[in-house]
Amino acid sequence: MTSSVVLEGRLHPVTPWRRAWAVPLAVIMFVFRDLPEWLHAAKSWPWWALAAAVGAVSFAGAAYGYISWRATSYRLTSDALHYRSGLLFQRKRRFELAHLQAADIHRPLLGRVAGVCTLRLSVSGKSSDLAYLGTAQCEVLLSALRTRMAGDRPGSEPVPAPTPASKNAGGVLLSVRPRTLALSLLLDVHTFMQAVMLLAGSLIPYVLFQQPLVLLSAAGVLAPVWQMTGARWPRWHGWTLTSGPGGFRADFGLFDTQHQTFRHQRTQAVILEQPLLWRRRNWVRIYVATAGYQEPQMIAPVATRGEAEALIAGLWGPDSVTVLRTFRRAPVRARWATPFSRSLSFFSGTEHFSVWEGLFLRSIVHLAPISSVQGVWTEQGPWQQRLGLASVSLHLAGGPPLTGDHRDTAEAVAIASGIRARSVRALRSQAGSERMTG
């Protein structure tokens, strides 16, 4: 059975200029090997010979870029996106639509001037770029991909006729004002302390040896320090989160605008992070752990707790908010195992569980559905055995493992067995519903 072609085309005509630099660069590197000889020979050449040489190099670069552009194309079918590229060594890549984790748009500053953008596809935590596409062309292709990604099962419905994706197609869930974003970044003491410690560590050799050349060691950390501090405001400027078919859509960026999609189906956990100075304003930073990604992805740099609970309620229902608000601290004797015993909490409901780590500079709350748990077990060290404590570890399909530290031994065993049983029931119920719809 052949798949019907929904959309096909080539990259933007400006793309050859992106690739035409290879030929002039190779010529320049070849000339610089014997630069004095080339200059001496060029003085004896007539002007038309030099013009012909420059024209030949320019024509070769333009021809190379044009031919490579003609050899690059994409074709969207009902079940996959096919991408072909390469001149001498052709590469054909196939992106299964059912396995796509995200389809994002990146608009660099110069690309916005030229009216082009990059379509970034994520599969199994790895990204591939289609650069460059026209803005309208990219929106049409993205709309077709998002419509297909919103389906519950691969091949369940044919892809409808693609239409340009609109930022306001769904309801706006939250919008971060520039002033609120700037204030929240200034109050994020934890990140600024990390940047200061990184910069101070690079200056220690200069303090010890008093050599000016040692200051060059600090130049290597200036870029990461800038990314951790001042670069965050233009990078997250204008953050807007909207609801779309089967997921969230985030649009942000002052100079380089970006668009990211987050599928509900692949969301394994929601993480709320609250720095110390945000607590009076009741602000949180929202992350989601997605299947296939090792690190959580941010969906809101700053939001009120009410906005965060509304997002969670829309994602998993009101029962998840109840679990989020419920805290069950570790036993009192856990203070002999860790000085932060009062900052640990773990609660398991009928369908969700929450893990809370209320550290001094930053408190972090993880909320996840029990059906997303892939592995659960208890751990008990020698000191925990003397105190009658144990830890419950849970592994999800995406993000770091979650641990309920220093629970009572009987409680830890009951939590592990209960979560394991409910997870198996949820998987069986999901498999049964898929067989019925099939």
Image: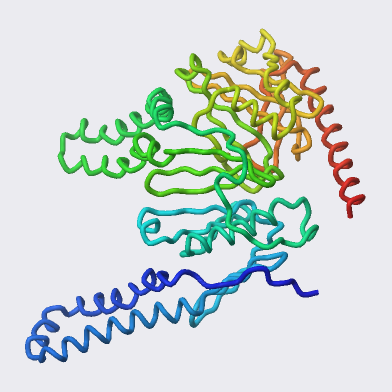
Q: From this viewpoint, which residue is outermost toward the top?
A: 332
Give the percent coordinates (x, y) of residue 358.
Answer: 57, 19
Q: Nearer the viewer, residue 237 or 213?
A: 237
Question: Residue visible at 74% across and 30% down?
Answer: 317
Q: Quadrant of residue 123?
A: bottom right
Tell me how the rendering is colored: rainbow
Count the numbered circles shown.
Answer: 0
Q: Nearer the viewer, residue 104 or 398?
A: 104
**In the image, residue 165 above or below residue 310:** below
**In the image, residue 433 above or below residue 270:** below
Q: Nearer the viewer, residue 397 or 413?
A: 397
Question: Residue visible at 60% across and 31% down?
Answer: 271
Which quadrant is home to the C terminus? bottom right
Q: Quadrant of residue 32?
A: bottom left
Which quadrant is home to the N terminus? bottom right
Question: Residue visible at 67% across and 8% down?
Answer: 332
- Residue 159 vs residue 102: left or right? right
Q: Quadrant of residue 354?
A: top right
Give the percent coordinates (x, y) of residue 194.
Answer: 39, 30
Give the percent coordinates (x, y) of residue 124.
Answer: 63, 54
Give the percent coordinates (x, y) of residue 13.
Answer: 43, 72
Question: Residue visible at 15% across and 40% down?
Answer: 212
- Residue 213 vs residue 317: left or right? left
- Residue 147 vs residue 16: left or right? right
